[in-house]
């Protein structure tokens, strides 16, 4: 695996948590004062770009985000890692491909089609779908199945609030999500050597989707989602491996049958439907007992123990009571 983008950074380059979390106070200061106060954060993370390409309604909704009690207090991963070290095969299999090859992707305007076992079916403009839903800032751990991890400050709406708006029927046991299919803008989708079938499909049980931790993200690091992070709408399920958190969602389907997900279809032995983080169940090709917390280097690998359910066991373990998690992985 090649070195992370910007791998020369050290722990000193991480945006201080207090500076980031108090950014709203800095923005209220004078321009000169704000610039002076924010200087350490800008130097540390190269700063999130000041220009936000999202439409004004989405920028406004994201700026009204409130802090969430679900947030971890762990040190944030720098912005340039969050946006420069990604798995988004629609743009290529390299970690820096999404940032390099995703700039021609057009996430606005955007529509989402809702179908299946729900009252609120149809095709909706994203603004209408999210209108009136309160955005929260949630700092979550992200654990990749490849055994690296980050700590990311997301913006988004609780999935439960969105699903209640769509009014799933009692017969809906699962909800499936589908990534947009635009090979003309997403070169990985049109590649002859594509590693997976497209469009990308993921799914959750309804109780997982309705869980308070499950988030439909619209932003990261205080701004709207960049293309490489799944603009304009992506799922974040913090107790599951990262491939469950599907990006650039264009379709939501309520169903009474477990959907066959993309990685499960590609290799069910390695990528099960549940994908709960479990240090006791290794990937067939590597151990899951530890993870490499970014930023890391060849000489400072920054390895930490992997926690059951990625550290969210107290909140979510009850969803799987009585299940054999070595079988339902």
Image: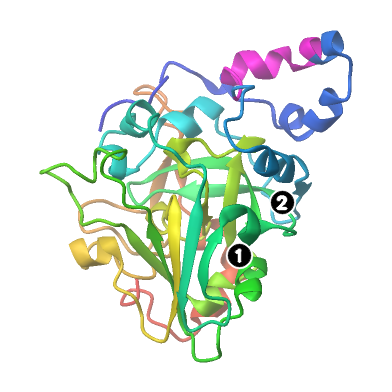
Residue at 67% from the left image edge and 68% from the top image edge: 161
The residue segment tinted magenta is 35-48
Q: Secondary structure at mark 2?
A: strand
Residue at 65% from the left image edge and 72% from the top image edge: 165
Question: Most extreme residue toward the right, as rendered?
Answer: 29
Question: Most extreme residue toward the bottom, as rendered?
Answer: 171
Q: Which residue is mark 1?
A: 159
265 in magenta: no
Decide: is 84 above or below 58: above
- Residue 260 coordinates in the image, percent (x, y): 29, 72
Residue at 26% from the left image edge and 66% from the top image edge: 264
- Residue 2 coordinates in the image, percent (x, y): 27, 28
Give the dominant element type of the magenta stretch: helix, strand or loop.
Answer: helix
Decide: is 56 above or below 268: above
Q: Which residue is mark 2?
A: 136
Question: Quick check: can you spot residue 214?
Answer: yes
């Amino acid at each position: 695996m090649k070195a992370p983008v910007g791998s020369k950074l050290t722990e000193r380059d991480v945006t201080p948590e207090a500076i980031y979390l108090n950014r709203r106070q800095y923005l209220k200061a004078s321009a000169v004062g704000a610039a002076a106060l924010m200087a350490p954060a800008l130097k540390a993370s190269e700063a999130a770009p000041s220009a936000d390409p999202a439409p004004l309604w989405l920028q406004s909704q994201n700026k009204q985000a409130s802090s969430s009690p679900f947030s971890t207090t762990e040190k944030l991963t720098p912005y340039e890692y969050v946006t420069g070290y990604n798995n988004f095969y629609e743009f290529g299999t390299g970690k820096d491909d999404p940032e390099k090859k995703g700039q021609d992707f057009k996430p606005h305007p955007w529509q989402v089609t809702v179908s299946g076992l729900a009252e609120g079916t149809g095709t909706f403009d994203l603004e209408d779908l999210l209108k009136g839903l309160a955005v929260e800032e949630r700092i979550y751990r992200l654990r990749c199945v490849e055994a690296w991890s980050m700590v990311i400050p997301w913006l988004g709406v609780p999935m439960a609030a969105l699903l209640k708006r769509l009014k799933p029927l009692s017969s809906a046991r699962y909800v499936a999500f589908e990534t947009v299919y635009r090979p003309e803008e997403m070169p990985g989708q049109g590649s002859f050597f594509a590693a997976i079938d497209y469009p990308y499909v993921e799914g959750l049980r309804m109780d997982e989707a309705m869980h308070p931790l499950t988030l439909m993200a619209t932003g990261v690091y205080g701004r709207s989602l960049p293309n490489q992070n799944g603009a304009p709408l992506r799922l974040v399920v913090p107790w599951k491996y990262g491939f469950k958190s599907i990006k650039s969602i264009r379709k939501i389907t309520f169903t009474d049958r477990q959907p066959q997900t993309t990685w499960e279809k590609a290799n069910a032995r390695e990528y099960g439907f549940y994908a709960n983080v479990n240090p006791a169940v290794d990937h067939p090709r590597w151990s899951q007992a530890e993870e490499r917390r970014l930023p890391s280097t060849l000489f400072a690998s920054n390895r930490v123990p992997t926690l059951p359910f990625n550290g969210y066991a107290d909140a979510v373990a009850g969803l799987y009571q009585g299940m054999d998690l070595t079988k339902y992985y």
